Amino acid sequence: MSATETLDVDPHTLRVVLLYLDGVATADQMADLAARLRSSDIDRRQVARLLLQVGLLEQVAHARGGVRSFETSAAVEHAPTASPPTVAPASASRQLAWHPQVSRPPASRHPTARRTAWIATSALAAALAGLFVATKTRQPDLDTAVSPTSALVAAGTATARPPHFLAPPTFRDGSLARVQSLAGRAFALAGGQRRALEPGAVLLPTDRIETQGPTARVTLSLADGTSLELRGEGLVSWALTNEMPRHAGPRVRVNLERGTAVASVPKSEAAPTIVFVTPRAEIHVSAGQTRFEVERDITKVRQRSGAAEVRRLSDGQRLEMEPGRTIAISDTAAALVAVDEPRALLVRGAETELDRLISARLESAGFAVTAVAEAALDASDLTDSALVVISSSSAGPVLAARLSAINLRDAAIPVVNCESLAFAPLAMTTRQGVGRKIAELIVEQPSHPLAAGRSGKVRIATVPIAANWALPASGAIGVVKLKTPRLYAVFAYERGMPMAGVSAPARRVSCFLDPKRPEPLTEAAWDLFDAAVRWAAELPAPERHGQGM
Amino acid sequence: MGRPVDSLLRECKKDAVVGNTTRGSTRLSKPVAMQEAVSEAAFSHFFTHRAMLRAYLRAFIRDKDLVDDVLSDVAVEVARSWDNYDRRLAFGPWVRGVARRVGLKRLHQRQRAEVTLPADVLESLGAVMDELSREPGGFDEQRERLGRCLERLTPRNRELVQLRYFGELKVEAIAARLRRSTGALYTAFSRIHAALLRCMEHGQKEPS
């Protein structure tokens, strides 16, 4: 189809087609339309496109249960019923939303036809030996408001995800997942046959995935953006579960039969499309990262971020999962009891790759991480935080103002600070700065836990990078320094020790990580960061099996 | 039609394994793996043509719900008739033939004699839809584009789209609600669809 043809869209022809579709075209109009369609390729193409467009609209509307508002988020707040939409004034920032609360039309609208459609759809799904066709013949029931990324979509950003309500639970070829990356041995089992997996492999609903050996690691990507990483030996199967076109629940069931898996579910205001099922529990992850360890008699679930709900299969007990919460589900325990991890508050600017790595390190240290943008930092964020980590992605002046506003300086919460301009508001230094070309540091106190077992010269980056330095107050413990005398990259205050004008209300540690990109950072640099976190939070040091540079 | 899914599944699997008599032919038993392969191949073909089929059915069936029913029946029929499909021929015309037969049968059952475009015109439209489905990105991309273009409609036009497609109101009802003539509304809808077609073609352009 050329652009010229499309620009020749003839509203008159389209009008007649719309009349025809509604069954109100006159005989003359029908004859004229038929003649046009026989003689004009352009008209045929336009009408074909129109029919497809109408089909898409009806399909999406139908799958969403008839009456659904398609209106602005502002209007959503004020139009909780199926009344005519209240459209907010146009503005560039307005976001469209599918109204999830709008009631359906009266059940009598097409009750028989719809019931018939549901049942027929069930038969369809069954006939195609996987209970999956029906869900593909209709659009998913994703009640959603358009996510923030859809603003980018609306602006024409090619890489942004489409509005979630339009995302089917499968890929366009009907597959449920793709192998994104693979290490070790993994197989797809189907029809009594086994085929070795490789990156890019397409997985159908009938496939079971088996990973072999403790080092196996397979990352699968699902159509809704969920990433599922299988670690070590394991077995996973799945299926599209619900052929009912308007069912509001998950459409894909992922059976974690054994092994360890980590699911990362993208944030969306839509209803989750996936449910994870183990022999002991059913887990609905609404967003975030969840780790599953599945053994025969017990299922362990750890919520790293986001939220989920766990339901024990044996008795239906439910438990909400929050970041940092871990739960072990067995049939023998009387009640579901969760253990919450300590929470680390990560204060950052615009999220960077460095922030993501810092977050991962904090999680590895056993923290549930809550990230907050510096401008949104509030005193309430400190509640329940066992540690505050300030990233160098922060914009100094904004952060300094917020730190003063919430009085973090006097808060009895350990702080690890990686932002040079935050040292002064925290009263940690008398002078500070950022070195632009630093690749090596010198460990002054190798026996201190903050030295992470390092000594002498430590290469912190493969190429010279920007790193924080400071002239700390007299009560500081200087551990790692620059070549310049008295300027430290890693220093700390024990609780109660004098800082610049005040005593430390809790442990305070400096962190030098301020690179433009994290790639050049060496393992030694990250070891020093980990050591800062552990010391500040008073966590035990890890066992070490030698050291290297 | 009220049978639970499990019984339907058993029935269909039984058909596939021990043979059926669809259109007078009887198949021999198949190994399970082959049965699954058949189902997957049929499904895959049907799935990639589903939007075309829906639009094709919509071109001669007025009732949108019936279109969905028929589409489901077509999928079942595709699975059952898969062995009768000559793989040397294009799938599109074959499945449209199935869809037309199933659709007309359902209309006949409902005793509906709808005035439709002639069969040759419908087929030519179906062929174009088939061709469009092979454009890069296919229907999934078109669906995404449509979502973006809908977001760009003016509030007034978006309201009209909502009422017609998401409110399932007939044009007469919309006209009564908005106190406009049905003729004016059909004109408005034709312009909206034209704008959406242009927008979908040239993603960045603003529809009316």
Image (cartoon, rainbow, N blue to C red):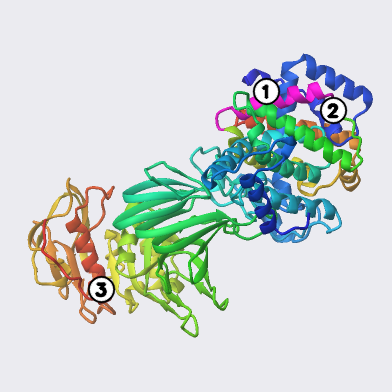
Identify which amino acid the numbered label 3 is placed on.
Ala
Q: Which mark is residue A6?
A: 1
Compare residues A267 and A93 and report the one nearer the observer.
A267
The residue under label 3 is A536
Magenta residues (range): B117-137
Q: Residues within 10 Å of mark 3 (few under 14, many from 20)?
A: many
Q: Dot 1: what SS?
A: helix
Q: Position of residue A359 (x, y in %)?
A: 34, 61
Query: Which chain's residue wears label 1?
Result: A
Task: Say which residue appears at 74% left-offset and 35% top-offset.
Answer: B23
Residue A86 seen from this side: no
1 or 3: tag closer to the N-terminus: 1
Q: Which mark is residue A541?
A: none
B121 in magenta: yes
Task: Say which residue appears at 51% left-offset and 43% top-offset.
Answer: A160
Task: Say which residue appears at 77% left-offset and 53% top-offset.
Answer: A67
A93 on left or right of A422: right
Measure the alpha-carbon separation of dots 2 and 1.
18 Å
Q: Residues within 10 Å of mark 2 (few under 14, many from 20)?
A: many
Q: Is residue B23 above or below residue A94?
A: above
Classified by dominant secondary structure, the portion drawn in magenta counts as helix
Quadrant in which residue A101 is drawn? bottom right
Q: Dot 3: what SS?
A: helix
